[in-house]
Amino acid sequence: MTSSVTPGRPVVASPWSDRANAVVAICWVLGLGGIAVSWMQVSNEARFADQQPWVVFGLGCVVGAALAGGLWLGLGLKAVRVLERTTADRLVRVLEEVGDRRAAASGVRRVVGAEPHVAVVGLNRAHRPDCQLVVGKDAVALDPAQVREAATCGVCA
């Protein structure tokens, strides 16, 4: 993604590179120029048989310009999808870090190799340690037998 900076204006990110913009602009200018040339040539001919090659040329220019526009949009969509994936991955990592810090702050340890569950003292639902409903509360770790007996949280389960 590129961004253009103009003094006094906000930074605007674009999914298209400068090269892609230049290529599509050249294709569109050539397409429009081809349409103009075919129009002028067709207007000089009286019979359709003489106009036909120029009509076909003009239609080819329209199709070429449309394909260039479609390719340009496809490149932009691809760049946006890549940005969405990287942003989602970063967001997941940040949320995992925040969840780990909150679970650590609540005094609950994560059990490596098992899905740990906790319960708030005095309540009967089993939660994951990073569940928003138990963060900051007095929670105790549950063993697997207690997890099977307890009702599971509707938020984190």
Image (cartoon, rainbow, N blue to C red):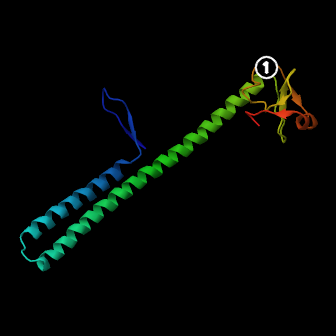
Q: Is residue 37 above or below residue 80?
A: below
Q: Between residues 112 and 80, which one lies in front from this camera angle?
A: 80
Question: Looking at the picture, how far across and down is residue 12, in whole percent?
Answer: 38, 36
Callout 1: few (<14), some (14-19), or many (20+) C-alpha neighbours within 10 Å? some
Question: Which residue corresponds to mark 1?
Answer: 137
Question: Looking at the picture, how far across and down is residue 50, in whole percent?
Answer: 11, 78
Q: Quadrant of residue 117?
A: top right
For the point 79% across and 19% down, the residue is 137
For the point 47% across and 52% down, the residue is 78
> Which secondary structure, mark 1?
loop
Direction from residue 99 to residue 78 in the image, left or right: left
Quadrant where the C terminus lies? top right
Residue at far bottom of view: 49
Direction from residue 114 to residue 1 in the image, left or right: left
Q: Between residues 155 and 30, which one lies in front from this camera angle?
A: 155
For the point 53% across and 44% down, the residue is 84
Q: Amino acid at mark 1?
A: Lys
Q: Quadrant of residue 69?
A: bottom left
Question: Looking at the picture, how far across and down is residue 52, in whole percent?
Answer: 17, 76
Quadrant where the N terminus lies? top left
Question: Looking at the picture, how far across and down is residue 48, in whole percent?
Answer: 13, 77
